[in-house]
Amino acid sequence: MGIDIAAAKKEKERKIAQEKKKQARDKKIQAGIEGFKKGYRGTSHICTMCGRPGRPKRFISGNILLEIFLWCLFLLPGLIYSIWRHMSTFYGCPDCGTPTMVRSDSPVGKKLMAES
Ligand SMILES: [Zn+2]
């Protein structure tokens, strides 16, 4: 009898530990989602060049049609062109196009927000 109780208790403890682990993981995921939403919404960033608050815009060099064209005709140039395009992708200011936007909750961002 004593062994059964001990085993049941151990099992219960194991379940509790597992539940706690799961909760911690869920919390982590939730925090990540919140952070992502916060970072990419509204006036999350500010441009250090022109002081424009807002969301950075994605800039991709080259042309999607040329990329498809190259892929259809020659495989290797298409691949090289794709790699080049994706390597030169950057996030920049929607107004002046410079990749100098900083997070508005960073020390530099806070300073700029206060000035503007
Ligand atoms: Zn700008």
Image: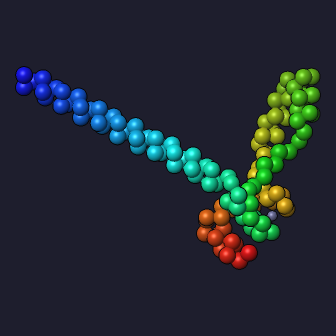
Quarter in which the N terminus is drawn: top left
* Residue 56, x across and y down, in percent: 75, 55
Q: Is residue 42 above or below residue 6?
A: below
The residue located at (81%, 49%) in the rendering is: 59
- Residue 35 appears in the picture as rendered: yes
In the drawing, does residue 108 fall left or right of residue 8? right
* Residue 44, x across and y down, in percent: 67, 59
The residue located at (24%, 34%) in the rendering is: 13
- Residue 101 appears in the picture as rendered: no
The residue located at (23%, 28%) in the rendering is: 11
Residue that lies at the very extreme toward the left in this rendered image: 2
How many discs mark residues in the rendered view?
0
From the viewer's side, name the closer residue of 74 and 25. 25
Q: Quadrant of ligand 1?
A: bottom right
Q: Quadrant of residue 70?
A: top right
From the viewer's side, name the closer residue of 56 and 77. 56
Quarter in which the C terminus is drawn: bottom right
Q: Is residue 98 above or below residue 49?
A: above
In the drawing, does residue 10 fall left or right of residue 74? left
